[in-house]
C-alpha cells in the first residue's frame, strides 16, 4: 500500500511478464490439444479464455498492441465454427509465438514484431466459414429481437429468458464466486419511465448493487437505447434476494425489481480471488451484446466446480534472494566445521574436561538443525521438471513437421524436483537431444512401415531420482546409432588407430560422438548430425557436475541419460592430497577406496592399469610418475565412475569426507576445466574440486605416443614439473 | 407547500443536519426551505467546492446536497475529496438533466445519489429517506444502509 503508483505499475508489469509466459504456454498446449481433437468445442473455449485473460491483463498494464491483437483473436474465436478448428489451432500457434515475441519486446523495450500478417489471418478466420457467420448473425438477430419483445413484458419474464447471455468470462467469474461461498443472483431492474437521467440512474443502481457484492455482469450496454428501460445485473453476494431487491428499489429511479438465484453458493467456502470482481468490472465496458453465446447447449450454467479454482497459495520470489539465503547457509556450514575443529582440538587438549560432553551435544543439535535448514532452503530452489518438459510438446510437433516425421511425445516423471538453476541450464542440451532424436533417430514414416514399426515414432522424456541424483532420459525408438560406423569415422578423423578402435568397447566408441566436430562430415549418414553440438551438450553437463551416457541398439532406438546433481551449491566430497595439495571430488562418484603397491600397477598400451579383484581398471595418475623400479611404495587408489565407466585415481593420501559449499571460480582465475570449483574448509584452507569428466577426458584425448608421461602429473603446474625434473627424489607421499 | 412526515436521525432522534452547496443563493434558500419541511436542519451552506470541504470538516453534516457547476471547485471534485476523507459522507448531487455524464462521474467517485434540477420536494424527500437508510427514523427496508 505504501508503494507509489509508479512502483506498483512496474511491479504489475513484472507480474504480467511472468504470468503471461504461463498463459502463452497454456495457449500452446491448448492449440496442440485442438490439433489432436479438432472437434472439441471445449478446447476452443479454453483457448478463448486464455486469450481473454491475456487481453485483460495486457490492457491493465497498458500494453495496447498486445491487448488489441488478443481482442481481435478472441472476437474471431467467439464467431468461429467447428469446420475451421484446424485453422484455429494453426493461428493459435502463430498467435502464441507473436505474443511471446511481443512480451519479450515490451520487456526489453525493443521494437514490436509485425502483427499485420497474423491479424489478416485472424480476419480470414472470421470470414471463411459461411455457416459460422450466418449462425452468428442469426443468433445476434434473435437476441436483439428477444430483447425488444421483452422490453414490454414484465421483468420476471425477462429474467427467466436472459440466461444465455453471459460470456464465457462472466460464467467463469460466476462459478468462482459460487465456489467461494456466494450466491450468484440475477437482478433485473426496470427504470422508472419518468426518470429523466436513466444513465445516471443506471450508475446509481450499479453502485447500490455493488455494495452487496461484486458485480459480475451488466446488460445492456450503457449506450444502447434499451438501457433506458431495463438493466440486468449479475451479482455475487451473501445477501438474500429480498435484501438485494430492497436495496435496488431506489425511489424515483427504479420502478420494479426482480431477483433470481442463478447459482447457489457451494457449501464449503473458499477464499475469493479479489481480481475476479475487479476484472469483471473492467469487462463491463466491452461486454457488448454480440458477445452472447449462440450455442443453446451451453446456455445452461456450468455445473458447480467444473472450472477448478486454483488456490493461489504461492509466493513469487526472485531467485537471487534464495541464492542469498543459500549462500548464508553455506557460510553457516563452514562455521559449523570451524566449531567442530575447535571442539576436536579442545577434546585433544583436555580429554578429562566435563564440558566436552556439553559442547558435543550442542554441536550435534546445531548440526542437525543446520542440516534441516540446508535441506529446506534447497527445497525452495526445487521445481518440478514439468516446468521444462512442458515446452516440449510444441517443439516436438514443429520439429517433426519440419523433418517429415510422425512423432508422439511421451512424458513421465514430470513431478520430479530439480534445482531451478540446473533445470534452466539443461534446457538447451535437452532441447538439442530431443531435436536430434526426432531428426536423426526417428525414421521417416515410410521407412518405419517397411521395418515393421508403427509409422508414428515415440520420443520419451523421463525423469526420476536415483540416490542423490536426478536422472533425465531422452529415448527414441528410431534407428539407433551404428557403433561400427563411429569406429570407422573416429579412425578417419585420426582420433584413434584401427587396432585401438577394434579393442574399444561400444561405450568407449560411443563417447566419440561427444567430441567436438565429430560428425560435421556427412559420410556417416545414419548418425550425421548426432554429433553436432553434442560436445556443447557435454560441456554444459560437465559444468553442472553432471554426466551424460548413451545407450543405443541398432534399429531399436537410443537413450541419452543425463545424471544431474540435486543441487549445485553443496556437495558431499572426498578430500585427498596429491603433491602436497588438497583436492576434492564428489563423494557420489567414489565407489571404493583401494590400497595397493606401485608393483601392482601395470602398463598396457601406454596406459597404467591396475587389476582389482577380477577387473582391469585404467589408472589416472594425478601426481608425478612413479620412480623407476619402485615397487614397494604404497598407493591409495580411489575407484570412481565417470559416465558409467570405472577408473582408478592415484592419490597420495586421504583427508576425509566433508560437506563442501561450492564457490564458483571465474574463468580469469582458472583457465583449466580440470577444476570445477573451490571451497573453503573450516580451518580456512582452500580446496579445489576436480571436474572428473574433464580429467578423464583429458587422459583419453591424449595421443598414444604422449600417453606414457602425460598420463601423470595432470595437476602439476609447469614449475612443479621443473622442480620434479630437477630433483626426482623430492616430493611424494605425505 | 405540502407537509412531510419528519425524518429524524435514528440514533438520537435529532433533526437530520444538512450541508447545502450551491453557488446560487436562491437555490440554497430553496433547498433550505424544503429541508425544513422534512424536519431537517441546515448545518451550513457553501457557495463553492472549497468552502464545502471546510464546512464539511467543521460541521460533519448527515447529508450534503451538492451542486455540480460552481466556481473555484466543481461539485464532482469536492464530492470526491470529501468522500476520500470521510467515506461515510452521504452526498446527493443536485443537477440539471444536461449534466448526466457528470452525475455518473460523481456517482463513480462516491456520491450516494442524485436529484434533478428543478428539485421537486417529494423526490428529494424519497431520496433522502433512501440515502439515510437505517440511520433515518423513517426507515424503509432491511439490509439498506450498508
Image (cartoon, coloured by chain):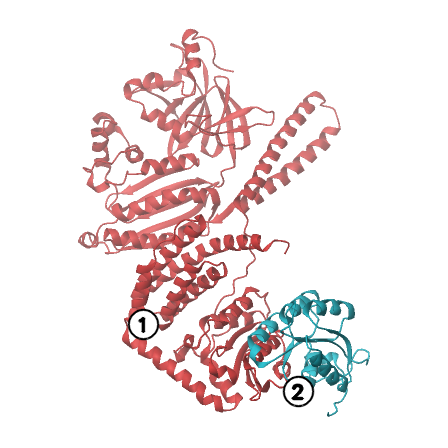
Chain colours: A red, B cyan
Residue B142: horizontal and vertical position, in percent? 69, 82
The relative height of residue A518 versus residue A262 in the rendered view (above or below) is above
Q: Residues within 10 Å of mark 1 (few under 14, many from 20)?
A: some
Q: Are marks 1 and 2 on the same chain?
A: no
Name the chain under label 1.
Answer: A
Instruction: Give residue A65's mark.
Output: none
B116, above or below A399, in the image: below
Residue, x 55% and y 64% (percent of image)? A275
The quadrant the N terminus of chain A occupies is bottom right
Mark 2 — on which chain does it sit?
Answer: B
| Looking at the image, residue A516 lies above or below residue B135 | above
For label 1, the residue is A82
Using the image, determine if residue A697 lies above or below residue B139.
above
Q: Secondary structure at mark 2?
A: loop
- Residue A324 place in picture, x, y as percent: 57, 40
Query: Is residue A380 visible in this depiction of the protein?
Result: yes
Alpha-carbon span between mark 1 and mark 2: 58 Å
Tell whether B120 sits left or right of A116: right
Q: Is residue A614 visible?
A: no
Q: Quadrant of residue B86?
A: bottom right
Left or right: B100, with A434 as reference point: right
The residue at 42%/7% (across/down) is A726
Q: Position of residue A562 (x, y in %)?
A: 39, 41
Residue at 52% x, 45% y is: A319
What's the residue at 34%, 51% (across, down)?
A460
- Left/right placement of residue A283 relative to residue A29 reads right
Along the horizontal axis of the image, is A476 left or right of A684?
A: left
Which residue is labeled 2 in the image? B120
In the rendered image, residue A257, in percent from the top left (x then y), is placed at 58, 86
Amino acid at each position: 500500500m505504501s508503494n507509489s503508483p509508479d512502483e506498483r505499475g512496474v511491479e504489475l508489469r513484472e507480474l504480467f511478464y511472468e504470468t503471461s509466459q504461463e498463459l502463452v504456454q497454456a495457449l500452446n498446449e491448448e492449440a496442440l490439444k485442438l490439433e489432436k481433437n479438432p472437434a472439441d468445442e471445449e478446447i476452443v473455449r479454453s483457448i478463448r479464455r486464455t486469450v481473454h485473460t491475456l487481453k485483460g491483463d495486457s490492457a491493465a498494464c497498458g500494453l495496447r498492441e498486445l491487448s488489441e491483437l488478443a481482442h481481435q483473436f478472441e472476437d474471431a474465436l467467439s464467431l468461429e465454427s467447428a469446420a475451421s478448428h484446424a485453422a484455429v489451432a494453426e493461428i493459435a500457434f502463430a498467435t502464441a509465438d507473436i505474443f511471446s515475441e511481443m512480451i519479450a519486446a515490451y520487456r526489453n523495450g525493443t521494437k514490436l514484431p509485425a502483427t499485420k500478417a497474423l491479424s489478416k489471418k485472424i480476419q480470414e478466420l472470421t470470414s471463411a466459414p459461411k455457416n459460422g457467420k450466418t449462425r452468428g448473425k442469426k443468433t445476434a438477430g434473435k437476441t436483439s429481437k428477444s430483447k425488444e419483445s421483452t422490453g414490454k413484458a414484465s421483468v420476471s419474464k425477462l429474467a427467466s429468458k436472459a440466461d444465455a447471455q453471459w460470456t464465457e468470462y462472466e460464467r467463469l467469474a460466476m462459478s468462482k464466486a459460487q465456489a467461494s461461498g456466494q450466491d450468484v443472483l440475477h437482478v433485473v431492474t426496470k427504470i422508472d419511465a419518468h426518470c429523466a437521467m436513466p444513465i445516471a440512474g443506471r450508475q446509481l443502481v450499479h453502485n447500490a448493487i455493488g455494495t452487496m457484492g461484486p458485480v459480475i455482469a451488466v446488460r445492456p450496454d450503457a449506450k444502447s437505447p434499451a438501457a433506458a428501460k431495463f438493466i440486468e445485473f449479475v451479482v455475487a453476494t451473501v445477501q438474500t434476494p429480498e435484501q438485494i431487491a430492497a436495496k435496488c428499489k431506489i425511489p424515483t429511479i427504479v420502478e420494479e425489481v426482480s431477483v433470481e438465484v442463478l447459482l447457489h453458493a457451494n457449501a464449503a467456502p473458499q477464499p475469493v480471488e479479489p481480481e475476479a470482481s475487479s476484472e469483471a468490472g473492467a469487462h463491463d465496458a466491452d461486454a457488448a451484446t454480440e458477445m452472447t453465446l449462440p450455442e443453446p447447449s451451453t446456455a445452461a450454467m456450468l455445473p458447480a466446480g467444473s472450472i477448478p479454482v486454483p488456490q493461489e497459495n504461492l509466493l513469487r520470489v526472485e531467485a537471487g534472494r534464495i541464492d542469498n539465503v543459500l549462500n548464508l547457509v553455506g557460510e553457516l556450514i563452514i562455521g559449523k566445521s570451524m566449531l567442530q575443529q575447535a571442539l576436536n582440538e579442545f577434546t585433544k587438549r583436555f580429554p578429562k574436561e566435563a564440558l566436552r560432553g556439553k559442547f558435543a551435544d550442542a554441536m550435534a543439535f546445531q548440526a542437525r538443525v543446520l542440516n534441516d535448514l540446508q535441506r529446506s532452503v534447497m527445497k525452495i530452489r526445487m521445481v518440478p521438471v514439468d516446468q521444462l518438459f512442458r515446452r516440449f510438446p510444441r517443439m516436438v510437433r514443429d520439429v517433426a513437421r519440419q523433418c517429415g516425421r510422425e512423432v508422439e511425445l511421451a512424458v513421465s516423471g514430470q513431478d520430479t524436483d530439480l534445482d531451478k538453476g540446473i533445470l534452466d541450464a539443461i534446457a538447451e542440451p535437452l532441447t538439442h537431444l530431443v531435436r536430434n532424436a526426432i531428426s536423426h533417430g526417428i525414421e521417416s514414416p515410410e521407412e518405419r512401415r517397411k521395418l515393421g514399426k508403427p509409422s508414428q515414432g515415440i520420443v520419451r522424456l523421463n525423469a526420476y531420482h536415483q540416490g542423490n541424483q536426478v536422472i533425465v532420459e531422452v529415448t527414441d525408438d528410431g534407428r539407433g546409432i551404428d557403433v561400427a560406423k563411429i569406429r570407422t569415422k573416429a579412425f578417419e578423423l585420426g582420433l584413434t588407430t584401427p587396432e585401438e578402435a577394434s579393442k574399444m568397447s561400444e561405450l568407449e566408441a560411443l563417447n566419440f560422438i561427444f567430441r567436438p566436430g565429430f560428425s560435421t562430415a556427412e559420410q556417416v549418414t545414419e548418425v550425421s548430425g548426432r554429433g553436432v553440438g553434442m560436445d556443447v551438450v557435454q560441456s554444459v553437463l560437465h559444468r553442472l557436475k553432471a554426466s551424460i551416457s548413451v545407450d543405443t541398439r541398432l534399429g531399436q532406438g537410443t537413450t541419452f541419460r543425463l545424471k544431474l546433481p540435486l543441487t549445485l551449491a553443496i556437495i558431499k566430497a572426498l578430500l585427498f592430497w596429491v603433491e602436497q595439495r588438497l583436492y576434492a571430488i564428489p563423494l557420489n562418484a567414489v565407489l571404493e577406496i583401494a590400497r595397493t603397491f606401485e608393483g601392482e600397477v601395470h602398463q598396457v598400451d601406454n596406459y597404467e592399469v591396475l587389476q582389482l579383484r577380477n577387473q582391469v581398471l585404467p589408472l589416472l595418475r594425478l601426481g608425478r610418475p612413479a620412480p623407476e623400479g619402485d615397487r614397494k611404495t604404497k598407493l591409495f587408489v580411489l575407484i570412481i565412475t565417470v559416465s558409467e565407466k570405472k577408473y582408478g585415481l592415484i592419490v597420495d593420501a586421504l583427508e576425509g569426507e566433508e560437506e563442501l559449499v561450492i564457490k564458483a571460480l571465474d574463468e580469469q582465475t582458472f583457465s583449466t576445466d580440470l577444476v570445477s570449483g573451490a571451497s573453503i574448509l573450516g580451518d580456512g584452507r582452500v580446496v579445489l574440486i576436480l571436474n572428473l569428466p574433464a580429467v578423464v577426458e583429458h587422459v583419453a584425448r591424449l595421443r598414444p605416443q604422449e600417453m606414457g608421461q602425460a598420463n601423470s602429473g595432470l595437476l602439476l603446474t609447469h614449475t612443479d614439473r621443473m622442480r620434479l625434473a630437477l630433483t626426482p627424489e623430492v616430493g611424494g607421499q605425505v | 407547500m405540502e407537509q412531510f412526515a419528519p425524518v429524524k436521525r435514528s440514533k438520537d432522534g435529532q433533526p437530520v443536519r444538512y450541508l447545502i452547496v450551491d453557488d446560487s443563493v436562491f437555490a440554497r434558500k430553496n433547498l433550505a426551505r424544503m429541508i425544513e419541511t422534512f424536519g431537517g436542519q441546515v448545518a451550513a451552506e457553501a457557495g463553492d467546492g472549497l468552502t464545502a470541504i471546510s464546512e464539511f470538516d467543521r460541521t460533519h453534516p448527515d447529508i450534503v446536497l451538492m451542486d455540480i457547476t460552481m466556481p473555484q471547485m466543481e461539485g464532482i471534485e469536492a464530492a470526491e475529496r470529501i468522500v476520500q476523507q470521510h467515506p461515510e459522507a452521504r452526498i446527493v448531487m443536485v443537477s440539471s438533466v444536461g449534466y448526466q455524464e457528470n452525475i455518473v462521474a460523481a456517482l463513480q467517485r462516491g456520491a450516494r445519489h442524485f436529484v434533478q434540477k428543478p428539485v421537486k420536494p417529494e423526490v428529494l424527500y424519497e431520496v433522502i429517506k433512501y440515502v439515510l437508510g437505517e440511520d433515518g427514523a423513517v426507515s424503509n427496508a432491511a439490509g439498506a444502509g450498508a
